[in-house]
Image (cartoon, grey):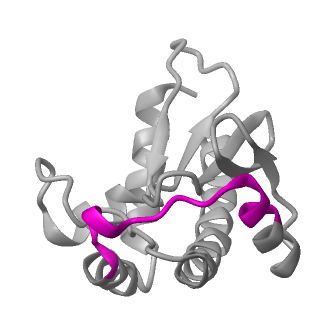
């Protein structure tokens, strides 16, 4: 698999993903750069326990992450908590045949709706409190469930073609 193959898979996922508009609206409604609030590690741990997340906590990077495996592809889902900007993404942690390290950001969900690929504003949600972070995280986790199912399907289809 190459980086281009991965991009095509991501494009297919964007086309099939439902409820994109809900995420776009969340980004618009929560965009508050001046009042954003990052969480401390103990707050993140508390949320992890409250929501019973099976994610790991990367303290230095200040994010939750979870690895998914689709055949020989290791895909890491990352959700930051430390800066009040919840710019979630997936990154491939398996060697690609072209030595690329492709990724898929939730920003692409917004860009697929708005068509604006230059302006970063309102392309990811922000939180101003711990409670707001928790509510945003719940929506992100629901999207993650749908996206990982689509990744599973797309990687299976790709492997059948290869």
- The reply, left or right, for residue 47 in relation to residue 31 is right
Which quarter of the figure is the N terminus placed in?
A: top right
Which quadrant of the figure contains the C terminus? top right
Lateral position of residue 4 relative to residue 142, left or right: left
Residue 79: image x %, image y %?
A: 60, 56
Residue 109 x %, y %: 35, 65
In the rendering, at what x and y percent does residue 37 appear? 47, 64
Q: Quadrant of residue 39?
A: bottom right
The quarter of the picture where residue 49 lies is: bottom right
Q: Residue at 51%, 56% (x, y): give it.
A: 88
On whether residue 160 falls in the magenta region, the answer is no
Find residue 122 and report its horizontal and vertical position in percent.
24, 67
Q: Specify whether residue 69 is in view.
A: no
Q: Is residue 62 above or below residue 147?
A: above
Q: Residue visible at 13% across and 63% down?
A: 115
- Give the camera-side residue of 143 and 44: 44
* Of residues 93 and 31, the one drawn nearer to the viewer in this rendering: 31
Q: Nearer the viewer, residue 84 or 103?
A: 84
Query: What residue range appears in magenta?
Result: 30-45
Q: Residue at x 39, y 69 (%)?
A: 125
38 up-or-down from 6: above or below: below
Q: Is residue 22 left or right of residue 111?
A: right
Residue beneath the point at 60% across and 84% down:
131
Q: Is residue 32 magenta?
A: yes
């Amino acid at each position: 698999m190459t980086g281009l193959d991965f991009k095509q898979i991501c494009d297919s996922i964007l086309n099939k993903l439902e409820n994109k508009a809900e995420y776009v609206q969340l980004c618009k409604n929560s965009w508050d750069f001046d009042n954003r609030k990052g969480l401390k590690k103990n707050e993140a741990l508390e949320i992890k326990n409250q929501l019973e997340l099976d994610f790991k906590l990367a303290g230095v990077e200040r994010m939750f992450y979870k690895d998914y495996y689709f055949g020989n592809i290791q895909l890491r889902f990352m959700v930051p908590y430390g800066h009040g900007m919840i710019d979630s993404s997936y990154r491939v942690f398996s060697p690609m045949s072209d030595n690329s390290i492709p990724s898929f950001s939730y920003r692409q969900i917004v860009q697929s709706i708005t068509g604006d690929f230059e302006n970063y504003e309102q392309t990811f949600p922000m939180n101003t409190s711990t409670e707001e972070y928790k509510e945003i995280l719940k929506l992100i986790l629901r999207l993650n469930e749908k996206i990982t199912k689509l990744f599973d399907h797309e990687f299976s289809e790709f492997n059948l073609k290869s």
